[in-house]
Image (cartoon, rainbow, N blue to C red):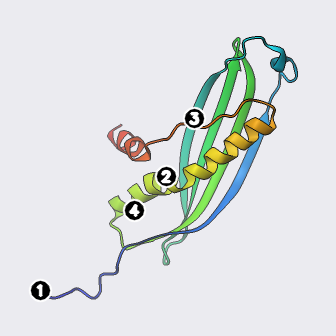
Amino acid sequence: MAVDERKKAAVFHFDRIYLKDASFESPRCPQVFSEPDYNPKIDVQLHISHQILDQEQGIFEVVLKVTVTATTNAQPAFLIEVQQAGIFTITGLSPQHQERALEAACPNALFPFVREHVNHLVTHGGFPSLLLQPVNFDTMYEQKKAS
């Protein structure tokens, strides 16, 4: 069987990671610290976006945005927004596999960094540590495709 030399090997490379944006708000400080049974309800929202930086070279920016809202007694305790970004080189994939890489593989690579930033902001805001639960970005991608 002849090898098709025109076909390039697939490449998925993590070129750079950076914090694009981060914010922390605690509108009820310091009163929230005196609540006797502080047990906040935590809401986590994730959003994935990507853009082509260089079509010919297959270079993309992927941004994983997380918004964490903690409420106690139906009032906000804190609000965090973090945009963790990365530059990826992705070549040699079919359009379907490239989309999956951008929507699932890249966010998987970014998640540990965004998780660390969220915990850092929470603890430096004076609140107990908050570790985001693992996320299955492959399942999220499948659900997005199905809807």
Q: Which residue is mark 1?
A: 1
Tag 2 near tag 4, CB within 8 Å:
no
Q: CA distance from mark 1 to mark 4?
A: 27 Å
Q: Which residue is mark 3?
A: 45
Disc with the residue nearer the chain's start (4 vs 3): 3
Q: Residue furthest right?
A: 30
Q: CA distance from mark 2 to mark 3?
A: 15 Å
Q: Nearer the viewer, residue 74 or 134?
A: 134
Q: Quadrant of residue 34?
A: top right
Q: Which mark's residue is nearer the viewer, 1 or 4?
A: 1
Q: Which residue is mark 4?
A: 98
Q: Quadrant of residue 131?
A: top right
Disc with the residue nearer the chain's start (1 vs 2): 1
Q: The disc labelled 2 sits on which kind of residue? A: Asn
Q: The disc labelled 1 sits on which kind of residue? A: Met
Element type at mark 1: loop
Residue 75 % position (x, y): 73, 16
Q: Which mark's residue is nearer the viewer, 1 or 2?
A: 2
